[in-house]
Amino acid sequence: MFEDHFPLNEEEKKQAKTAAKGILGCFFAFVLLIVLFCSIYTVDEGERGVVTTFGEVSSVSDAGIHMKLPFVQSVYFYSTRVQKASFNDLTAYSHDQQIIENYKISITWQYKSDAMKDIYTRFGTKEVDNIPSIFITVIGPQVQQRSKTILGQFTAQTIIQDRLTLEKTIETKLKEDLATYPIQILGIQLEDVNFSKSYEVIVEQTAQKKMEIDKARNELQKVELESQQKVKQAQADNQAIKLRADADAYRIESVAKAEAQAIRIKAEALARNPDIIKLNAIEKWNGNVPTTVLNDSVPLLNLK
């Protein structure tokens, strides 16, 4: 009809056919590019891809480049990296009925890399403020309930002083509660535990009194230590005096025994040889003869 109103010569007809073929080829090339683009997908390291065919899970893809059927299959990505989620402004009571006006729990967790199909099947891909639905429907309520229960088993003082034991207890119980779910709890941190103002005042007063008691106890221990040191020093001095006295007595006794022994030996020697006395007198004589001699005097030397 177009040719009836606008007759074309043979050359124009060839050009029109060539243009039509070019347009049709570009169209098919464009469609092919779209199909190819929709068929290729990549999975980053630290992720897994869940492939569905018409909504049914057909496979799970690891990191790398993959192919899928365009418009038939879809891919949903889940991070297997370590993640952190926090639950704020929680309230509870301690074992001694003290009010915890608010506290915060942070959970370090990750998906189980071998449970991607289960994750998609049970919890889908829905997120609220970048928080997976599993946290909203399962983990959040479990964390709140379990933490309140365990905090109720600890006194306020224990909660303040033994935070590590408390965190470990909550972590152990949460792991037990969530063992059947496709996530791993790697650790928890209990933060910003705030009691009522009245209890905080009591804690401050108690702490002040404890400091005063500790100070008095330390001073008493210091006095007792100094007294003990003085007693030990006196005992040491007395022991030294006693040792010196014992040494002096031993020395005197030893000298006396030696002198007595010497006298005994000398007496025995004189008894065996009386001439030793005359010999000692001769050895000590200086050669002078006395000028005056009494009638009854004993001669100094016997010259006969």
Image (cartoon, rainbow, N blue to C red):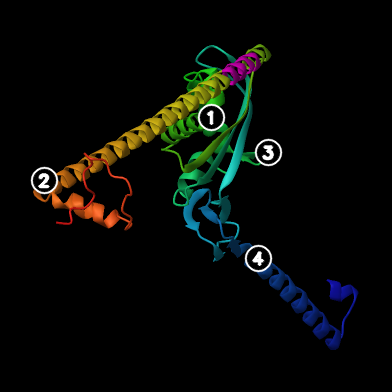
**Residue range of the region highlighted in magenta in the rendering:** 204-216
Crowding around mark 3 (Cα neighbors within 10 Å: few <14, some 14 to 19, many 20+) is: few
Q: Residue at x 63, y 62 (%)?
A: 38
The residue where tag 2 is placed is 271
| Front residue of this view, candidates 104 and 213 | 213
Q: Which mark is residue 37?
A: 4
Could you tell me how far apart the alpha carbons at marks 1 and 2 are, in whole angstroms?
A: 98 Å
12 is within the stretch colored magenta? no
Whichever of callouts 1 and 3 sits on the residue coming sooner in the sequence is 3
Q: Residue at x 53, y 29 (%)?
A: 163
Q: Residue at x 47, y 56 (%)?
A: 59
The residue where tag 3 is placed is 129
Could you tell me how far apart the alpha carbons at marks 1 and 3 are, in whole angstroms?
A: 30 Å
Q: Quadrant of residue 200?
A: top right
Q: Quadrant of the C terminus?
A: bottom left
| Side (left or right) of 245 relative to 71 | left
- SS of the residue under disc 4: helix
Whichever of callouts 4 and 3 sits on the residue coming sooner in the sequence is 4
Q: Quadrant of the N terminus?
A: bottom right
Looking at the picture, does residue 11 appear above or below residue 58?
below
Residue 43 rendering spot, x and y as whole percentages: 58, 60
- Residue type at mark 4: give it: Phe
Camera sees residue 54: yes
Q: Which mark is residue 163?
A: 1
Whichever of callouts 1 and 4 sits on the residue coming sooner in the sequence is 4
Crowding around mark 2 (Cα neighbors within 10 Å: few <14, some 14 to 19, many 20+) is: few
